[in-house]
Amino acid sequence: MIESHVGAPRPCKTLQLSTSPLGSSNSYRHIRLAPASRASIISSFRLKDLSCTTNRNLGTPKSMEYFSTAVIFLLTVLGVVFYYLQKQQEEDDGEQKKSSLSSSSSDQQRSLPEEEHEKRKDSFSSWSPSKPCRRFSLAEIKLATNDFDDAFVIGKGGFGKVYKGKIEFGEEGIDVAIKRLNLEHSSQGATEFKAEIEMLSQFRHSHIVSLLGYHEGSDKREMILVYEYMLNGSLDHHLHKIRANGSNSSLLTWIERLNICIGAARGLDYLHTGTSVQSRVIHRDIKSSNILLDENLAAKISDFGLSRIGPANLVGTTNVYTDFIKGTFGYMDAEYFATHRLTRKSDVYAFGVVLLEVLCGRPALDFTLDEEQHSLAVWARDCIEEGKIDRIIDPSLRGQTTASCLNEFAQIAYECMLSSSKNRPTMTKVVARLEFVLALGSQKHGGVTIAEKVWVLFSIPVKHELLET
């Protein structure tokens, strides 16, 4: 006998079957059924009972609301996954197209003198721009900057000065940023100048600053680079110098900061994985001052003077041993500092420090604070390990997003700065996780994020009685 029942208010029917031979003394009416028929009837009643249970658990408006929230949440996750699968497919297609041109490019490389190849160290190949950017005359540069008038200066550094100017392109003039290298105070100026032209002439991406042209004097005394003008300056300027109403807080909102981080991460991911079949790029100097913002606060990576181009066919990750340690203190990977082994994961470490700057609202190094807080990377990492994330979060971010989003963001930064480079995530994974944080923080329903509602959904105790056989 098989009994099927689910607690009420709408009890399901009870069916009693007997497989006794016809003519037995049983008081029930007997039906002889084949084994397959009996199994079919039993299955149909079990499905009906499950339907009763499902209707009873999801029949209320509140339960349906949780269910719909879960569906939206899952669709968001699937959307992110689909985006990156599509991106990977596009990269694979691009690699196939480029591989078809490899034979012609290899013939050109064989024609180069052997000494030129020997000049490149650390297994890095030398390659000239396929589409050289425009070469400006010194007269054009002087006209754009009013003969290098200090009133046009928008930035200074060890490399020299940056001027804002206007240069004619076709029938219209456009605003540009003109970097004039100070060769007297920079022994590596010429090397970095050529490296920047080589990098930015090769690569074009919406999150990489565009090099429009350059000027190199015949006597090598003038080396000038011309970039697209970025209206909103650098990220560090917004985080540490522009303050809201005289307070210590940045004007950037949480969503703006998160979008900036995602844009910069996409640019760095392109350098690491999307530049070509044979080469990958290590930026080597990722920091908040090298992340520039356009009029829409879209982030673009700049300053490729220290960058290196390396082969993509190495096992594990692109790496090279360098004679000299180069970079910016506060952002340098301790593993690189100790071993001189430069990898793409060195960029990931530096990007983790940038994420902490965004989260904490303070620079990578600040010697005005207590000794334990001099280095943002060391101090923040200790706080995260001790579960004291609340101590490091920029007070201006409170109330702009949920604690779960801030915790996840801090966890991403922490993993980027792990001591062992092999344990750090790739930039592709960092982009995906940051976009997931953005989705969780920005999609709210009734004042509660989707993540919170899904958590409540899966916390609902579902009680039902199993069918007895």
Image (tube, helix red, strand yellow):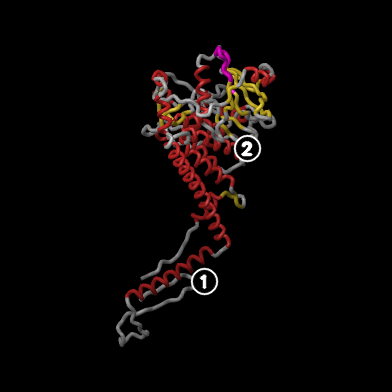
How many numbered callouts? 2
Look at the image and tell me in which quarter the C terminus lies. bottom left
Q: Is residue 23 above or below residue 91?
A: below
What amino acid type is highlighted by mark number 1?
Pro
As for residue 306 lying within the magenta part, the answer is no
Residue 274 x, y percent position in the rendering:
47, 36
Crowding around mark 2 (Cα neighbors within 10 Å: few <14, some 14 to 19, many 20+) is: few
Q: Is residue 90 above or below residue 152?
A: below
Residue at (36, 86) in percent of width and height: 27
What amino acid type is highlighted by mark number 2?
Thr
Residue at (58, 31) in percent of width and height: 361
Q: Which mark is residue 9?
A: 1
The residue labelled by disc 2 is 253
Residue numbers of the magenta segment: 215-225
**Alpha-carbon span between mark 1 and mark 2:** 51 Å
Q: Of circles 1 and 2, which is in front?
A: 2
Front residue (pair 402, 73): 73
Ranked by sequence position, the earlier of labels 1 and 2 is 1
- In this orientation, does residue 66 appear? yes
* 77 sits left or right of 1 in the view: right
